[in-house]
Image (cartoon, rainbow, N blue to C red):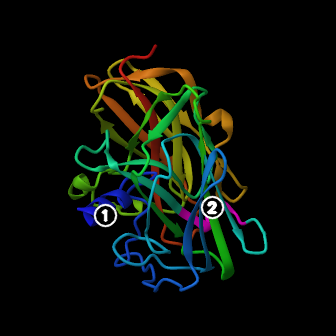
Amino acid sequence: MVRLALILFVLLLFVAPSVLADVNSHSHAQTPFQPKAITTVTLQGDALVLTFGPIDLPAGHSGDLASSLPIHSFKAPKDMTVTGFRSRIFTKDGKELPGQYLHHILLQNLEEKSLSCPGEPTYFAGAGIEITDAKFPPGYGVPIKKDSTLVAIVAFYHKVPPTKDVLATFTMDLAPEGARVKPIKAYTVGVNVVCYSQFSKRPPNESDEGRELKPGIVQVDSKPLKFTTDACVKYAYPHGHDGLLMIALDNKTTNQTLLRSVPDVENGGNLRGFLPHQIYSSPKGFPVNTKDEYEMTMVYHLSRQETLDLHGMGNYLLYVAPGPCE
């Protein structure tokens, strides 16, 4: 059961179809784990810090779980509430590296069931190539019980220059002891198929890495969406890569655009991240429900001279409170 849970976990969205390396069709090297590459977990005041590495890049994604390091399972050291998260990637001597060196960092709680993918474990935090800091609205957080089994996976991007002794950190900010925090839970939505149990329904142009992209063409992909619960969205963490121009969430029943996020990019189009004003965060929130029809949309463009085999994705990791908005 644990192995099944891990497989389900890595195939979720931020996670997600884009994060699992397709070693057969995309030539991702099946390299053995490097002996020196380890994962450590430390509790530092009001923060739980995961450190991955050091590892020499580029590194392949080994095994069924698409990881550059061995999958790390650990117990929550205490009752805690996650109020945000942030990540860094750098060399052992302290040199900061671009976010493009990181493919994904994913965290899952095996004790909790997913809201968005019934029957699958919940994915509660993660970072992708954009490594944007996340900070939930004041007074809200994701609760985790002491001794819950948590799982961490990291994969480094396989299309980077040779770089020695690379490390990544993923820091979960925790509410202080005794703080009154209202619970929220992650809910994953995306244009790509985000649930492992639904992978058989992927369209022909979609792989584990995302939707197939063609250089020089603006692509607009949309997908219908139904929510499995009535809830209030308090925070929306956007994720994308490889030429993303925009992602959006619309309520088609009420004819409303609920979210529209445009990433910050370099002159050549490389995604830097999402600036603070592009990340939805509100104590008031907005409602979603099981009755209305919703739609996810992503817009992509690759330069005409692009030679790499790139795939697109557009996802949100929504953090929701149960029931109606206050």
Q: Position of residue 257 (x, y in %)?
A: 46, 26
Residue linked to disc 2:
169
The answer to whether residue 200 shows anywhere in this view is: yes
Residue at image location 51% in from the left, 36% down from the top: 236
Q: Position of residue 206 (x, y in %)?
A: 34, 59
Q: Circle 2: is it few (<14), some (14-19), or many (20+) Cα within 10 Å? A: many
Amino acid bearing label 2? Thr
The answer to whether residue 307 shows anywhere in this view is: no
Q: Secondary structure at mark 1?
A: helix
- Name the residue nearer the viewer: 142 or 77: 77
Question: Extreme top residue here?
Answer: 326
Identify the magenta region. Answer: 97-103
Indicate whether 61 appears above or below 218: below
Q: Position of residue 186 (x, y in %)?
A: 42, 39
- Name the residue nearer the viewer: 304 or 120: 120
Residue linked to disc 1:
7
Question: Would you identify the image quadrant in which residue 84 lies?
Answer: top right
Indicate whether 274 appears above or below 149: above
Residue at image location 69% in from the left, 63% down from the top: 98
